[in-house]
């Protein structure tokens, strides 16, 4: 039995999968040429240890497709939309295919990209920690030596609020206007 926990980085509804037409030349795909979706359901980004997966999950359970997420995984975007991507899905026996994936909301597409990036950053940090790189401990010793002191001068003017400094510098007398009720903020409150 494995002690590793399955982490869900995102779970998004209204995900669509499309059969991709053959790519013409070396150009990017265009989502407007994909036609009608062949599948609709949920898109999840999950990970267990160093293995990440994008799962296209059916609404009634089961999976339509899965795509491995690794340290170098990048979603291939399309020319005409930020909501659609080309995803490499892997089947039994290691066979793979490319499918178009799209979302009804731009924020869902952004969330998927962010989830992949967050997972990759965690992988990188764990690898750096194992290899000894990326140490958070500085190479130099910044501690104070025997008998050394730090002197901080906090003058009285520096402790005053900006409104108190204005009052001191201003020689004009201000007259307070009477307000007609609510919404009055006391003078000693700091407002932004």
Image (cartoon, rainbow, N blue to C red):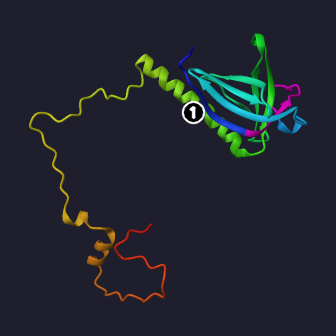
Bounds of the magenta segment: 13-29
Say if residue 27 shows up in the picture.
no
Question: What residue appears at the point 13 percent right and 43 percent down from the top-left corner?
Answer: 149
Q: Specify the farthest residue to the right.
A: 35
**Secondary structure under the numbered disc 1 in the rendered image:** helix
Return the x and y of residue 57 as percentages of the image width and height.
76, 30
Q: Specify the farthest residue to the top.
A: 93
Say if residue 120 shows up in the picture.
yes
Label 1 crowding class (10 Å Cα cut-off): few <14, some 14-19, many 20+?
Answer: few
Return the x and y of residue 69 as percentages of the image width and height.
65, 24
Residue 66 found in image quarter? top right
Q: Establish if 2 lies above or below 102.
A: above
The quadrant of the rendering that contains the C terminus is bottom left
Q: Specify the farthest residue to the left.
A: 147
Return the x and y of residue 166 as percentages of the image width and height.
31, 75
Residue highlighted by disc 1: 118
Question: What residue appears at the point 78 percent right and 26 percent down from the top-left corner?
Answer: 62
**Left or right of 80: which side holds 148?**
left
Of 57 and 93, the residue lying toward us: 57
Total numbered labels placed on residues in the image: 1
The quadrant of the rendering that contains the N terminus is top right
Of 121 and 48, the residue lying toward us: 48
Of 72 and 19, the residue lying toward us: 19
Return the x and y of residue 85 as percentages of the image width and height.
75, 33
Q: Establish if 3 lies above or below 28.
A: above
Q: Establish if 165 lies above or below 155.
A: below
């Amino acid at each position: 039995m494995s002690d590793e926990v399955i982490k869900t980085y995102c779970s998004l509804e209204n995900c669509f999968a499309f059969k991709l037409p053959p790519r013409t030349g070396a150009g990017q795909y265009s989502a407007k040429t994909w036609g009608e979706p062949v599948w609709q359901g949920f898109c999840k980004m999950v990970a267990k240890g160093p293995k990440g997966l994008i799962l296209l999950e059916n609404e009634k359970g089961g999976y339509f497709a899965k795509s491995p997420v690794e340290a170098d995984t990048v979603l291939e975007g399309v020319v005409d939309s930020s909501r659609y991507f080309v995803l490499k899905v892997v089947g039994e026996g290691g066979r793979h295919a490319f499918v178009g994936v799209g979302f009804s909301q731009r924020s869902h597409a952004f969330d998927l990209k962010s989830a992949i990036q967050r997972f990759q950053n965690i992988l990188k940090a764990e690898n750096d920690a194992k290899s000894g790189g990326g140490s958070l401990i500085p190479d130099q010793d910044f501690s104070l030596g025997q008998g050394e002191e730090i002197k901080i001068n906090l003058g009285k003017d520096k402790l005053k609020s900006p409104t108190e400094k204005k009052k001191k510098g201003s020689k004009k007398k201000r007259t307070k206007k009477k307000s007609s009720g609510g919404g009055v903020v006391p003078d000693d409150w700091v407002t932004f």
